[in-house]
Image (cartoon, rainbow, N blue to C red):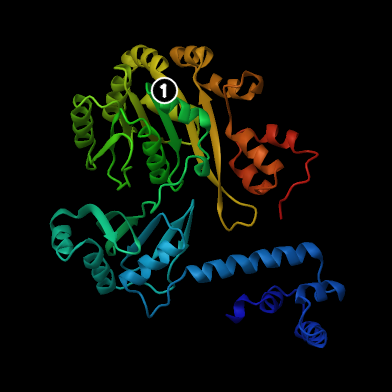
C-alpha cells in the first residue's frame, strides 16, 4: 500500500523531492511521531494548506478505491458479491473479457483489476442463477430472474450474450427498507399518499436507488390497514408484514406483458397501485386510468426534472389524444417528486437532492394547457409555497456546507441564477 502513503503522493506529484521528504520525516521522528507529516511540510515551506487539502482528498479517494477491489486470486462469486455488498453497491456487472464493476450511487467503480475469463463468468452465473442458466441462455440469449445469497443480499439478475461472450448484471435490493426522511422524501408526498387518491409521480435517473425509494413508498402506502396495495415491479422488494395487505406482481420485460399485468391488477380493484416503471404508453395510460377511477397510484419514471418527466409522458401519445390526456393528467396528478444524488463534501457518500411540485390550481391549469415550461417559472416563485426546484435544494445544501460548488454547478439548470446567489457565499469547493 506504499502508493497510498502521503509521502508517495508528494513524490508522485513532484511537490517535494526525496531530500526534502527525508528531512521532514526525520523531524517527525525526533518529535516522537506525534505530528502529522503534512503539518511539518507546511512549516518547512515545502507545501501550502490548499495543496495539503487536495492531497488528503486524493489519498482518501485512493484508499476507498483500493478497499472496493477484490484480489485477483479470489474472484469467486461469493467474494465478488460480498465486496459489492460491503461497498454499498446498487449494481454489479460481471462480463467475459472485462473486470468486474459496481455502481455506488451514480458512479461506477472497478471491483477487480483482473480481466475475467469465460470459465470464471460461467461459474459466477451458475452459482448465482442456477446450474442450468447457461443452457437457457444459449437458447434465449437473455435470462432474467431473482437472485438471493444468504448473508449477502438479494435482487434481480440479468444474464445476456455480448460480443465478447457472456455477461450478467445483478441489482441489489435494500436489506432494510430506508425511511422516507433518509431518502429525502418530503412530508407533503407522504401526506398525499396517506390521503389515498390520485397520481403521485416519482422521477429520477439511473443509479439513484429506485428500488429503495419505491420500497419506502410501498411501506408508506401500507400504513393504512384498510388498504389493499399492489406493487407491480420486477425488482424484489421487502414487503411490509404489518398494516395493509400488500402483494407484488412481476410483469416481465416486454411492454405488452407489462400492460397485461397492469390491466389484470386494476381489475382486482386495489386501493393503492405502485408501478415500478410508467415510461411507456401502455403502462402510463393504465396507471392514468386507474388514478382517474379513484385509486392511489404511485408511478416511477426515468427523467431529470418535473418538466422533462411530464414532457416525456405527453410525447407517448398521438397528437389527437393530447387534449384528453392533458385534461385527465391535470385532474388526477397530485404531486411530482424528483430525486437525484450528489457527492457529499468529502466525496465519500451521496446526498439526496430533490425537486417538488405540489399540484394546485395554477399548476393544474398549466398542465391542462400543455405549457409545461411554465412549471419551472412557478418553482422560482418561492412565495407560492407549492414546491421547490432542484436548484433551490442544491443552493440550500451548498449554503449548509454539505456539498461542493463544482458538483452543484455541474447539475444546476439555471447556472446564472445559482452564481448570482452564491456570489458572496464562502464556498466549500476544493
x and y percentages locating residue 115 in the rendered image? 37, 72
**In screen coordinates, is 362 left or right of 113?**
right
Q: Is residue 353 visible?
A: yes
x and y percentages locating residue 178 in the rendered image? 45, 46
Residue drawn at x 24%, y 42% as measured from the top left: 253
Residue drawn at x 44%, y 30% as measured from the top left: 309
As displayed, is residue 48 above or below residue 267? below
**In screen coordinates, is 119 left or right of 302?**
left
Q: Quadrant of residue 194?
A: top left
x and y percentages locating residue 161 in the rendered image? 24, 58
Q: Nearer the viewer, residue 293 or 37?
A: 293
Q: Nearer the viewer, residue 371 or 63?
A: 63
Q: Quadrant of residue 165?
A: bottom left
Give the residue number, with chain letter if any, for mark 1: 195
Residue drawn at x 38%, y 40% as measured from the top left: 214
Q: Nearer the viewer, residue 181 or 70?
A: 181
Q: Residues within 10 Å of mark 1 (few under 14, many from 20)?
A: few
**In screen coordinates, is 3 left or right of 311?**
right
Amino acid at each position: 500500500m506504499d502508493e497510498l502513503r502521503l509521502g508517495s503522493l508528494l513524490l508522485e506529484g513532484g511537490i517535494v523531492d526525496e531530500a526534502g521528504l527525508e528531512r521532514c520525516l526525520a523531524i517527525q521522528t525526533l518529535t516522537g511521531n506525534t505530528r502529522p507529516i503534512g503539518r511539518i511540510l507546511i512549516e518547512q515551506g515545502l507545501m501550502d494548506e490548499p495543496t495539503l487539502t487536495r492531497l488528503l482528498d486524493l489519498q482518501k479517494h485512493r484508499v476507498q478505491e483500493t478497499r472496493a477491489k477484490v484480489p485477483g486470486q479470489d474472484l469467486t462469486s461469493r467474494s465478488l458479491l460480498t465486496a459489492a455488498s460491503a461497498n454499498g453497491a446498487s449494481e454489479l456487472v460481471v462480463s467475459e473479457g472485462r473486470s468486474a464493476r459496481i455502481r455506488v450511487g451514480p458512479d461506477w467503480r472497478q471491483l477487480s483489476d483482473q480481466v475475467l475469463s469465460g470459465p470464471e463468468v460461467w461459474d459466477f452465473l451458475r452459482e448465482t442463477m442456477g446450474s442450468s442458466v447457461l443452457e437457457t441462455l444459449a437458447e434465449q440469449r437473455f435470462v432474467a430472474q431473482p437472485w438471493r445469497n444468504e448473508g449477502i443480499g438479494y435482487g434481480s439478475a440479468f444474464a445476456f450474450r455480448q460480443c465478447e461472450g457472456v455477461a450478467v448484471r445483478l441489482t441489489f435490493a435494500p436489506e432494510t427498507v430506508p425511511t422516507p426522511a433518509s431518502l429525502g422524501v418530503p412530508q407533503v408526498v407522504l401526506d398525499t399518499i396517506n390521503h389515498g387518491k390520485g397520481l403521485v409521480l416519482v422521477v429520477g435517473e439511473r443509479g439513484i436507488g429506485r428500488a429503495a425509494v419505491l420500497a419506502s413508498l410501498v411501506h408508506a402506502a401500507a400504513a393504512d390497514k384498510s388498504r389493499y396495495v399492489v406493487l407491480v415491479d420486477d425488482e424484489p422488494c421487502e414487503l411490509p408484514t404489518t398494516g395493509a395487505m400488500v402483494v407484488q406482481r412481476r410483469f416481465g420485460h416486454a411492454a405488452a406483458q407489462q400492460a397485461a399485468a397492469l390491466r389484470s391488477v386494476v381489475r382486482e380493484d386495489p386501493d393503492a397501485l405502485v408501478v415500478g416503471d410508467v415510461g411507456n404508453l401502455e403502462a402510463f395510460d393504465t396507471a392514468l386510468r386507474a388514478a382517474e377511477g379513484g385509486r392511489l397510484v404511485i408511478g416511477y419514471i426515468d427523467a431529470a426534472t418535473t418538466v422533462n418527466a411530464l414532457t416525456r409522458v405527453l410525447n407517448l401519445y398521438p397528437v389527437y389524444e393530447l387534449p384528453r390526456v392533458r385534461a385527465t393528467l391535470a385532474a388526477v396528478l397530485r404531486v411530482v417528486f424528483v430525486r437525484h444524488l450528489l457527492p457529499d463534501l468529502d466525496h465519500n457518500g451521496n446526498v439526496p437532492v430533490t425537486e417538488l411540485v405540489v399540484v394546485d390550481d395554477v399548476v393544474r391549469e398549466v398542465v391542462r394547457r400543455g405549457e409545461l415550461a411554465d412549471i419551472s417559472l412557478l418553482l422560482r416563485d418561492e412565495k407560492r409555497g407549492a414546491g421547490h426546484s432542484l436548484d433551490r435544494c442544491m443552493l440550500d445544501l451548498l449554503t449548509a456546507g454539505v456539498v461542493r460548488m463544482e458538483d452543484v454547478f455541474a447539475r444546476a439548470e439555471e447556472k446564472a441564477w445559482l452564481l448570482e446567489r452564491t456570489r458572496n457565499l464562502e464556498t466549500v469547493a476544493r
